[in-house]
Image: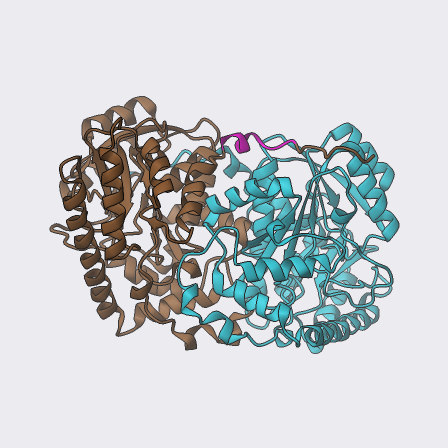
Chain colours: A brown, B cyan
């Protein structure tokens, strides 16, 4: 006995656990005096006060049901139905944020080697989950109004994915909002191939100047199964961890069982706080305030980007969501730029983190909701200087 | 297009998802006028009031770190260290209840076919998680003071488990509290074979008349890796979902990454509420009140059991935890009894749910913390009548 520590025999999945680039970047972002465009933190000053009465009820101290609080499921079903996706309260499962929906969807669908499809680029924490479960991920390119449809059809036919993960409304990171035609065409293709859709929709409420309807693709499916993920983290109090999934009726029982095995149920006071907000008279005013506040920030970022990077980068102005997706025209390796930027006191998310193969190097994702105007100005000036240095 | 719904190609894991017996029983338990000994609901009248000041701070609205709130990690590290398991705050990871620790431990350790070991009987929701992940589960018999040590050694040598899941203190369902000698012997065996220990310890604070020290086995290990799971659900507010894991230092980063992929982080206000309670002057008085309250309930159940089932069943009086584990001397099929009992208006958990092979039929688990005295009396009288009917 004694002597060296024994090493555990870990699961194979752990060899696929993506580590540290993103965590390192976000840890750096928290250093004092660091200007951060890296994370996706909502603007704290736009969060409404908590409805204290809703959460202090001692009857919420006791265990609750995995299926969730009736008040939450009813209010959220109504909220989701307003998007055009008609669901009943029994089709709503409360989650500890929509990230948990990715975990449950992966548990439902993905074994090691299961073929699946995502957009390229796509949400990095979704990639992390799908890769952890061992998905064999093919991608479809994102164009200005949605995915490349010919490529999508080819991937569905050849790769035969069990499921497709899409963020059709203010995509993270690209900001794309699928056109109504693209939504319809994607739904038809998924129906044709019978492929399950995981539709992630956390940014819908942060619509800044949307010019067309954005009906969830889940609502357009006639035959294909679907799981729709929603979040209150961009609208209310992300630190309380509150989201939900909605799904085709026949999938609900298994998702409930998976949730029960994961953490029994979502904390009850937060469910009550959200349902209180969803039913309150202040809801629509708060959404207006939120959009106005984010629009001002986005426009400030757009102006600063034009000033500092207008001649050496290109981007679309995002119509919602939290990010600019910026392509560098000359300097191609944003990972190398990042190392210098972090030393200079500014941090962003390099594009490679959003691709399953990690090879695309010319993009960077810039968050606009967290930095002040003055930080935007200084941070982008720093990036501009670094990009114009000799040898870049 | 149109016509029949397409069926999804689900993961293999879903075929291992245990469904409905337990859920059915717990659903039945919620019917009006049903007397329930089935669940593990703590006594609501013994939960302390929430420290409102701790949870209303608007700085808690924003996203937090996966690693958790410093105040929580520090207070919990201190709380865990008082058990004899010396840990630093960096070895504490806040969880949405200790159930989530089972999910993370399974993700870390278990692929389909991974050999592991549990007690027989063992906690049913742990079985559910390990089976979902595809563990090849061997068991070791529980005796009065701990596991059968010869059997444990034989299983470690032959089955070569990657990990062992134990509930050494007021085991669920058996109520067993391992003796100090058993703890030491188990630790030595795990050290010898280098087997990772998952030690689940939710009931420790509900010690009613413990006559010996109950040092966590994790604290006695010299070489073997360990993960220790704790919960505040039996002491404070289970509806808020607050627990934690502690682990050997070298396991923490991977567990943090797995937690991040699961739900980003544990809700922050609950962490603050618990750390406030852990540091408050009322803590020790509350623990005394809790133990007194549970002792009264346990003694009432013991008296009622003696009156109604004394001649046809046997059991040990539990020295802590929430359950009596009752063996029927004549009537052997508690599953069949359950069907009749549910019709008669009383529900319990049949023993088979606590064995991986589901074959052991002569036990029932009776919770004593939720029913009133009058319900205990009526419920056990009903069970007695059913057991004495002709043909049983």
Which residue is at a point 70% across and 45% down the rendered structure image?
Answer: B355
Q: Nearer the viewer, residue B391 or A67?
A: A67
| Magenta stretch, residue numbers | A9-16
Q: Nearer the viewer, residue A25 or B340?
A: A25
Predominant SS along the magenta part: helix
- Place of residue A117 in the rendered image (x, y in percent of width and height, measured from the top left): 33, 31
Q: Quadrant of residue A342?
A: top left
- Place of residue B373 in the rendered image (x, y in percent of width and height, measured from the top left): 72, 77
The residue positioned farthest toward the left in the image shown = A211
Q: Quadrant of the N terminus of chain A?
A: top right
Query: Residue A306, relative to residue B340: is it above or below?
Result: above
- Apparent side of residue B306 relative to residue B125 in the rendered image (left or right): right
Which residue is at a point 73% across and 30% down the rendered structure image?
Answer: B160
- Apparent side of residue A273 relative to residue A46 in the rendered image (left or right): right
Residue A313 visible at all: yes
Q: Quadrant of residue B35?
A: bottom right
Q: Is residue A55 magenta?
A: no
- Apparent side of residue A208 relative to residue A252 in the rendered image (left or right): left
Q: Nearer the viewer, residue A239 or A365?
A: A365
């Amino acid at each position: 006995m004694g002597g060296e520590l024994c090493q555990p025999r870990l699961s194979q999945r752990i060899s696929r656990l993506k580590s540290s680039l993103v965590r390192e970047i976000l840890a750096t972002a928290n250093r004092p005096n660091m200007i951060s465009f890296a994370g996706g933190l909502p603007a704290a000053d736009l969060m409404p006060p908590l409805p204290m009465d809703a959460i202090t009820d001692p009857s919420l101290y006791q265990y609750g049901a995995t299926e969730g609080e009736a008040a939450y499921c009813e209010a959220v079903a109504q909220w989701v139905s307003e998007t055009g996706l008609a669901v009943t309260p029994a089709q709503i499962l409360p989650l500890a944020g929509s990230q948990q929906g990715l975990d449950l969807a992966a548990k439902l669908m993905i074994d090691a080697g299961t073929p699946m499809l995502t957009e390229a680029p796509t949400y990095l924490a979704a990639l992390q989950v799908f890769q952890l479960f061992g998905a064999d991920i093919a991608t479809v390119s994102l164009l200005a109004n949605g995915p490349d449809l010919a490529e999508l059809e080819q991937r569905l036919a050849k790769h035969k994915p069990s499921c497709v993960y899409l963020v059709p409304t203010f995509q993270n990171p690209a900001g794309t909002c699928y056109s109504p035609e693209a939504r319809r065409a994607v739904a038809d293709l998924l129906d044709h191939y019978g492929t399950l859709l995981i539709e992630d929709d956390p940014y819908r409420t942060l619509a800044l100047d949307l010019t067309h309807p954005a009906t969830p693709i889940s609502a357009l499916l006639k035959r294909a199964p679907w799981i729709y993920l929603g979040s209150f983290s961009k609208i209310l109090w992300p630190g309380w961890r509150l989201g939900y999934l909605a799904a085709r009726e026949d999938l609900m029982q298994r998702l409930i069982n998976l949730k029960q095995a994961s953490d029994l149920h979502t904390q009850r006071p937060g469910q009550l706080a959200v349902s209180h907000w969803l039913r309150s008279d202040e809801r629509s005013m708060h959404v207006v305030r939120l959009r106005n506040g984010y629009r001002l920030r986005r426009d400030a970022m757009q102006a600063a980007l034009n000033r500092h990077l207008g001649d050496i980068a290109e981007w679309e102005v995002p119509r919602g969501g939290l990010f600019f997706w910026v392509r560098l025209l000359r300097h191609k390796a944003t990972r190398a730029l990042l190392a210098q930027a972090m030393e200079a006191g500014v941090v962003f998310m390099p594009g490679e983190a959003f691709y399953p193969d990690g090879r695309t190097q010319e993009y960077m994702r810039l968050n606009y909701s967290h930095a002040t105007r003055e930080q935007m100005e200084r941070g982008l000036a720093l990036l501009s200087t670094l990009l114009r240095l000799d040898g870049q």
